[in-house]
Image (cartoon, rainbow, N blue to C red):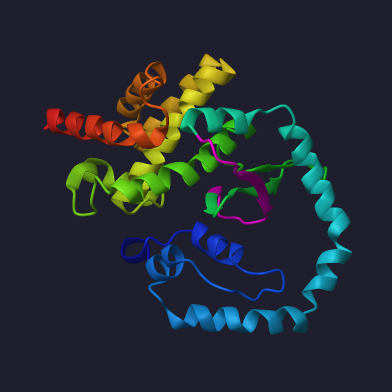
């Protein structure tokens, strides 16, 4: 699925975000239905059954009877997000001028990862949350990694900007052997296409730049950089060097869209030098 259709853990989330409140659907985007589900009629069949299934299991009754519990989780996370000016940084860094809705979605999945998706102007960070202690309201995402709310949010929201640029320019095709030296490590992490490897390299580099520029926590920054490199993101320093150039030349590069081709050019040129 991952190799042939760019399917990933975030794909079901993207699918359900296109449903109406009663679980019916008016349309599915071509990017989702055609590319990630290969126009499989079984997907449409599943969706057609959802409204009756939700009514049969009385989902609304269950949801609203537990709403107070959900609210406790939500309020706890919302309090921890207070004061994190993530939206301002993202808008400035990417050069976004149009209005976007930044939404944090808590999901109780045990996939040990968080996901960034977008649906038109709604940008989502999906945080997989787990209990942190005996306090039932004390939850946090992804208990296998260094945790920091701000870096998680910058990382996941960034996918809504970087992924479309990678699709738009298509400068590194899937038959390009550029990532052959790290392919096995990336595959173990769930990145089984050039596009997904490239996207996460760039997003991780931008997240590190955020930590350096906004948090001024050099110790955490160095630790996260070391972690990313140990996981196999070998080209992250090259991308960060390009990003530093971007930051110093914002008078010329008004947004990430205008700079993206140069970022890829620098990456490709380094690869040729290594050869």
Toward which corner of the image does residue 98 lie, by quadrant? Answer: top right
Over which residues does the magenta segment extend?
Answer: 96-115
The front one of 208 and 189 is: 208
Tell me if residue 109 is in the magenta stretch.
yes
Residue at 79% in and 47% down = 73
Depicted 147 relative to depicted 65: above or below:
above
Depicted 240 relative to depicted 264: above or below:
above
Residue at 61% in and 42% down = 143
Residue 227: x %, y % from top left:
44, 30
Q: Is residue 238 left or right of residue 41?
A: left
Q: Quadrant of the C terminus?
A: top left
Residue 80: x %, y % from top left:
74, 33
Residue 61: x %, y % from top left:
85, 72
Q: Is residue 90 left or right of residue 183?
A: right
Depicted 83 relative to depicted 120: above or below:
above
Q: Is residue 13 left or right of residue 130?
A: left
Residue 145: x %, y % from top left:
55, 37
Q: Is residue 207 visible?
A: no
Magenta segment, principal secondary structure? loop
Q: Quadrant of the N terminus?
A: bottom left
Q: Is residue 196 left or right of residue 97?
A: left
Residue at 29% in and 49% down = 194
Tell me if residue 15 is in the magenta stretch.
no
Residue at 64% in and 34% down = 149
The front one of 199 and 100 is: 100
């Amino acid at each position: 699925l991952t190799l042939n259709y760019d399917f990933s853990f975030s794909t079901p989330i993207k699918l359900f975000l296109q449903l109406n409140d009663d679980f019916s659907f008016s349309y599915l985007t071509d990017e989702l239905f055609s590319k990630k589900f290969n126009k499989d009629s079984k997907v449409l069949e599943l969706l057609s059954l959802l409204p009756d299934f939700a009514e049969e299991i009385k989902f609304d009754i269950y949801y609203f009877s537990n709403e107070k519990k959900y609210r406790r989780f939500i309020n706890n996370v919302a309090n921890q997000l207070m004061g994190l000016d993530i939206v301002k940084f993202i808008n400035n860094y990417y050069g976004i001028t149009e209005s976007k809705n930044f939404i944090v979605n808590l999901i109780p999945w045990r996939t040990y990862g968080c996901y960034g998706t977008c649906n038109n102007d709604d940008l989502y960070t999906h945080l997989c949350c787990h209990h942190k202690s005996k306090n039932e309201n004390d939850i946090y995402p992804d208990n296998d990694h260094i945790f920091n709310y701000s870096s998680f949010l910058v990382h996941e929201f960034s996918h809504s900007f970087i992924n479309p640029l990678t699709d738009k320019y298509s400068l590194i095709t899937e038959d390009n052997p550029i990532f052959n030296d790290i392919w096995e490590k990336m595959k173990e992490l769930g990145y089984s296409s050039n596009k997904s490897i490239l996207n996460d390299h760039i997003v991780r580099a931008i997240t590190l730049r955020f930590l350096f520029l906004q948090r001024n926590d050099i110790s955490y920054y160095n630790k996260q950089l070391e972690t990313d490199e140990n996981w196999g993101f070998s080209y992250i320093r090259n991308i960060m060097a390009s990003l530093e150039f971007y930051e110093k030349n914002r008078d010329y590069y008004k947004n990430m869209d205008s700079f993206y081709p140069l970022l890829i050019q620098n990456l490709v040129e380094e690869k040729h030098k290594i050869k």
